[in-house]
Image: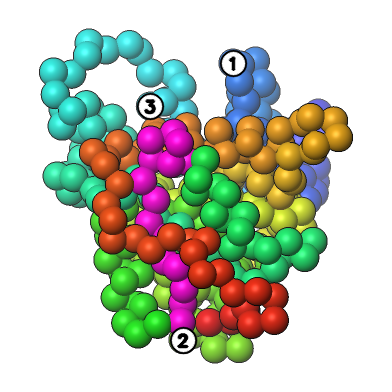
Amino acid sequence: RACESANGARVAAKAGVVAEAVQALSGARDTDLRQKALTLLAEIAENSEAARASMRDGNLIDTLVRLLNRSWSVVQSEPSTTAEAEASNAATPEDALAMPAAYMYSAYCSHDWGRDELKRNHVERIGAVRTLLEKEGLSLCALGSEQHEDVSRQMANGIAQSACVIVFLTDSYMKRAAGLGSRGDDDNARFEFNLACSPLKGVARIVPVVMEPRCLAQTLWQPLFLGKLGGKQYVDLSRDNDEGSGAKHFDEGVALLASMIKSVPGSHVAAAPAAAPPVAGGMPDASNEPTDD
């Protein structure tokens, strides 16, 4: 019960307990665990102004709204049309008004290039994610390369035409999006992430996916990402399937990702358009992979 004191609450807030509790709240599968997470957050907030500010600036409200809409919603009668079904799933009246009549894609894929901290080909792993998601009936927009003309327009169009944005988090991606890469503010990753966070899409429609082990702790994220996405439920795809034990870490993570995408209003598109180039097609080898652009 250390969080019931002011000193205990301050220590807990500095240690990242708020972000971990919100993550637990979002991922809990039963009401007892959710109640414990809510109680902990309430105790910390009651005794720490810094923690209250963190909850206001983070995504606690977004998490609660999503849980109320998706996990604790009452059963309603079946809508008579697909359009009515999408409108009824909107989180707020403003969301319903902002939603276009139909998206072309279920989700836009924003990611880094090259290899991750375990020297795995990141683009190949993104391609595996896309293949599994498409088997779930989802349509993904993923640019085949950053090295072509008018990429900014294609990125903007892809994000605008997608129901949500999947942000595949690596340390390199977060640094680039924060303007800390070799191209600074002109980095394509920064353009993509800023556009995803803008009113064109918004933080509520961003799905974070952790792709390497060092990014699992939200307290170690770049401040930009901690401020925008800290507290949101993320999908852990840092581990591959284990052939020895038979554990399907990667496949189970993609299954969770699919369910999160399907919960986004407008994500059930009619069919996959042919305009998006395949993410794994013509993939460069390690010697000529782009690392910053």
Residue at figure coordinates x 29%, y 75% from the top left: 153
Asked if 236 appears above or below 32 in the picture, the reply is below
Give the total number of marks visible in the rendering: 3
Quarter of the view holding residue 265:
top left
Where does the image place residue 111, in percent across and percent down from the top left?
Answer: 53, 64
- Circle nearer the viewer, 3 or 2: 2
Find disc 2 in the rendering and name its residue: 186
The region drawn magenta spans 133-147
Distance from label 1 to label 3 (Cα)?
Answer: 15 Å
Main secondary structure of the magenta stretch: loop
Give the amino acid type for the residue marked by disc 2 in the picture: Asp
Q: Can residue 91 be seen from the camera position used here?
A: yes
Q: Is residue 21 left or right of residue 265?
A: right
Looking at marks 1 and 3 on the same chain, the residue that comes earlier in the sequence is marked by 1
Classed neighbour count for the residue bearing mark 2: other residues with Cα under 10 Å, few (<14), some (14–19), many (≥20) = some
Q: Earlier in the sequence, mark 3 or mark 2?
A: 3
> Contact, CB < 8 Å: mark 1 with mark 3?
no
Residue type at mark 1?
A: Thr
Mark drawn on residue 69: 3
Dot 1 falls on a residue whose secondary structure is helix
Q: Nearer the viewer, mark 1 or mark 2?
A: 2
Q: Is residue 273 left or right of residue 113?
A: left
* Residue type, numbered disc 3: Asn
